Image: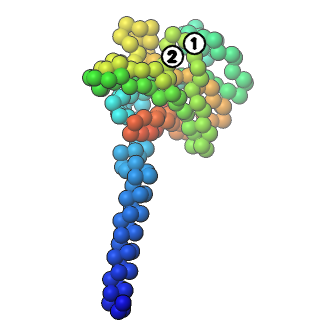
Amino acid sequence: MDTFTKSNWFRGLVIAFTIFASGTALAACGGSDHEKKTGIVEGERFELGPLEYNVLFTRPLNPSDVEDKEYLVGQPEPKPDQTYIGVFLQAENLDEDESHALPDSFELVDTAGNRYENLESESSYALRPGADVGPEDVVPALDSTPEVGPIEASMLLFLIDDASLELRPIELEVEGEDGPASVELDL
């Protein structure tokens, strides 16, 4: 092989490898459809696949308050350095043909990277992670306790360390088909 042929052969090999590596990297990360959605704030609708979400309201819950007792049914008293947080949201399945499941869990994340997973809840206001949402259905269901309640939304319940309340913004992370999404909470 002469020098010109070796040079062209090597150049072709480098180009083929570059194309292969680029395609593999794109396939591994799922392309741009699966980038984290950020910059979302309470009250702003966002879609993850066929499910559309709206975080309406977030607030600390007080076990001594009459209204909040209904949100905290079955929960133990928090430790002196912990606070229950209620995140109230709505979800809608935009697919007119198929049911789609809510994520199995949700997380709160503070600016130090502390993560808190939602608690199981016996409250009639609680969102049921992992539940199927029927075609064109909404959560909470029409005329259900959370839908006709004071906030008109289903609740995710979290127990967080009081120190995290100072590490704002605190964000709700929601997994989804083309997510995840991160919602900045107004705490």
- Name the residue beneath numbered marker 1: 122
Q: Which residue is the extreme one toward the right?
A: 80
Look at label 2 and name its amino acid: Ala
Q: Describe the element under mark 2 as helix, strand or loop.
A: loop
- Name the residue beneath numbered marker 2: 126
Residue depicted at x 57% and y 12%: 122
101 or 48: nearer the viewer: 101
40 or 34: nearer the viewer: 34
Q: Which residue is the extreme one toward the front?
A: 1
- Give x and y (percent) for residue 108: 55, 33
4 or 139: nearer the viewer: 4
Q: Is residue 34 above or below residue 163?
A: below
- Give x and y (percent) for residue 151: 43, 16
Residue 16 appears in view: yes
Q: Which mark, residue 28?
A: none
Look at label 1 and name its amino acid: Glu
- Give x and y (percent) for residue 13: 38, 75
- Give x and y (percent) for residue 105: 53, 29
Q: Quadrant of residue 121?
A: top right
Q: Quadrant of residue 63?
A: top right
Residue depicted at x 32% and y 90%: 4
Residue 56 appears in view: no
Marks counted in the figure total: 2
Q: Are marks 2 and 1 in contact (CB under 8 Å)?
A: yes
Residue depicted at x 69% and y 21%: 78
